[in-house]
Image: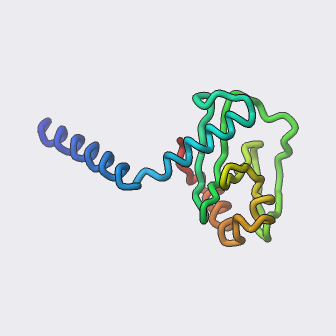
């Protein structure tokens, strides 16, 4: 019985490793780049930052970044962006990254980096708490 459990655990580890090697773990290089750029632009250390990633939409990444700061001055409530109503119950608000620049969701929509359907998807994931932490 113990040997069977060991084989299952070993097989899971191998499958996960192979999956990551072939792109199954997301875009780690991009996540590293986002953290690096954010740290550089805001005078933080990369290892102080973590990302909750909601998805990638045609080269635009939507995420919440956490680090060694508070959230003073951030309003909590309902915001309409591109015809999608977002309700933020905490000051942790998703933002976007594309080609070395950071955007609010409104800015990313205005710049046509995110579509209405992208925003609907982000909002559904935000409400459901569906994200990958990196």
Q: Vertical placement of 112 versus 53: above or below? A: below
Q: Quadrant of residue 33?
A: top right
User: Which residue corresponds to the image point at 55% horizontal and 41% vertical from the top-left?
Assistant: 32
Closer-to-camera residue (7/17): 17
Question: What residue lies at 30% left-to-right and 50% top-to-bottom?
Answer: 18
Instruction: Tell me the quarter of the picture where residue 51 sits.
Output: top right
Q: Position of residue 26 (x, y in %)?
A: 47, 52
Figure colour scheme: rainbow
Instruction: Establish if 22 lies above or below 4.
Output: below
Residue at 82%, 63% in the rendered image? 80
Left or right of 121, for residue 134: left
Q: Nearer the viewer, residue 52 or 26?
A: 26
Residue at 49% across / 46% down in the picture? 28
Number of numbered tags placed on the structure image: 0
Q: Is residue 63 above or below residue 59?
A: above
Image location (x, y in percent) of residue 134: 53, 41
Residue 52 x %, y %: 59, 45
Nearest to the observer: residue 12 or residue 76: 12
Q: Quadrant of the N terminus?
A: top left
Q: Quadrant of residue 84?
A: bottom right
- Direction from residue 111 to residue 2 in the image, left or right: left
Q: Position of residue 105 (x, y in %)?
A: 75, 57
């Amino acid at each position: 019985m113990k040997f069977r459990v060991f084989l299952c655990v070993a097989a899971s580890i191998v499958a996960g490793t192979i999956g990551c090697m072939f792109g199954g773990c997301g875009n780690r290089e991009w996540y590293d780049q986002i953290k690096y750029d954010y740290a550089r632009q805001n005078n933080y250390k990369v290892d102080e930052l973590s990302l909750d990633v909601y998805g990638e939409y045609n080269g635009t990444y939507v995420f919440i970044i956490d680090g060694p700061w508070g959230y003073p001055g951030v309003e909590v409530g309902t915001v309409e962006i591109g015809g999608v109503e977002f309700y933020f119950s905490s000051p942790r608000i998703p933002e976007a990254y594309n080609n070395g620049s950071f955007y609010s969701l409104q800015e990313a929509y205005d710049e046509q980096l995110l579509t209405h359907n992208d925003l609907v998807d982000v909002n559904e994931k935000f409400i459901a708490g569906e994200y990958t932490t990196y």
